Amino acid sequence: MESSFKKSYEKTTNPDGSIDLKFKAERIGAHFGAGIGAFLILLLYPVSCAVTYPVAAMFGEVGGRNTSNTPIFVWNVAALALFIIAARMVNIGRTTLTIKPKEGIVFNGKQLPFKDIQTIGTVHETTGNNPKGNAYVSAQSHGTEIKVTRYVRKDLADALAAEIRGASGKGWT
């Protein structure tokens, strides 16, 4: 029987034996996300007001409508649209991580051989506003923590780390 549930990442084996893991990194981090959201609201609302109010006033006068209500409505709708667009731009999108079995991993244009990695795991961050939190896959190499993926859900980070450990040929715990 085949499962009717969909994985949160796609696993593709290339002809050269390498494995591509495609996943959606849609989170930017628990602490950073709260700050960037407040910054976007403070930055975009005045800008959207300055841009949309004259346009709304022009359409209100040209259309022969009451110019005291139409510009305010259009102004607020445009400000909301700009905020939604900016919030979506913060979302990262699809990311690909390449595993070369028994050799290493390739991510963000960088290579990390398995022989240089002491451990592969996940780092989980939470805040009071985001109790589920965000996580990323990390590798410990030569005393340095290397962030292998961007922020993702914790269960996805755990699954990606397990795929890397499985393809490495090393006996990590």
Image: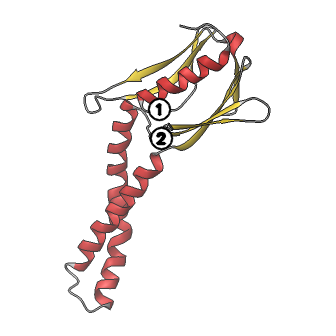
Q: Which of label 2 and label 1 is nearer to you?
A: 2
> Horizontal and vertical percent for residue 36?
38, 41
Labelled disc at residue 98: none
Residue 19 placed where, x, y %? 68, 31
Judge left or right: residue 11 versus residue 102: left
Q: Which is more N-terminal, label 1 or label 2?
A: 2
Alpha carbons under labels 2 and 1: distance apart? 20 Å
Residue shown at 65% from the left, 20% from the top = 167
Residue 43, above or below 115 = below
The answer to which image quadrant residue 61 occupies is bottom left
- Residue type at numbered disc 2: Lys
The circle on residue 151 is 1
Colour scheme in the image? secondary structure
Local packing at callout 1 (Cα closer than 10 Å; few below 14, some 14-19, many 20+) is many
Find numbered disc 2 in the image and state the secondary structure of the residue it sits on. Answer: loop
User: With 144 as the anchor, is 169 left or right in this view?
Assistant: right
Q: Quadrant of residue 16?
A: top right
Q: Mark 1 is on which residue type?
A: Tyr
* Disc 2 to disc 1: CB gap under 8 Å: no
- Toward the viewer: 173 or 48? 173
Give the vertical position of 105 relative to 140 (above or below).
below
| Residue at figure coordinates x 40%, y 22% from the top left | 124
Q: Secondary structure at mark 1?
A: loop
Q: Residues within 10 Å of mark 2 (few under 14, many from 20)?
A: few
Q: Position of residue 56 (x, y in %)?
A: 32, 77
Residue drawn at the location 57% of the way across and 17% of the way down:
139
Residue tagged 2: 6
Identified at 42% across, 57% down, the residue is: 85
x, y percent for residue 26: 46, 41
* Quarter assignment of residue 140: top right
Q: Is 90 displayed left or right of 168 in the figure?
A: left
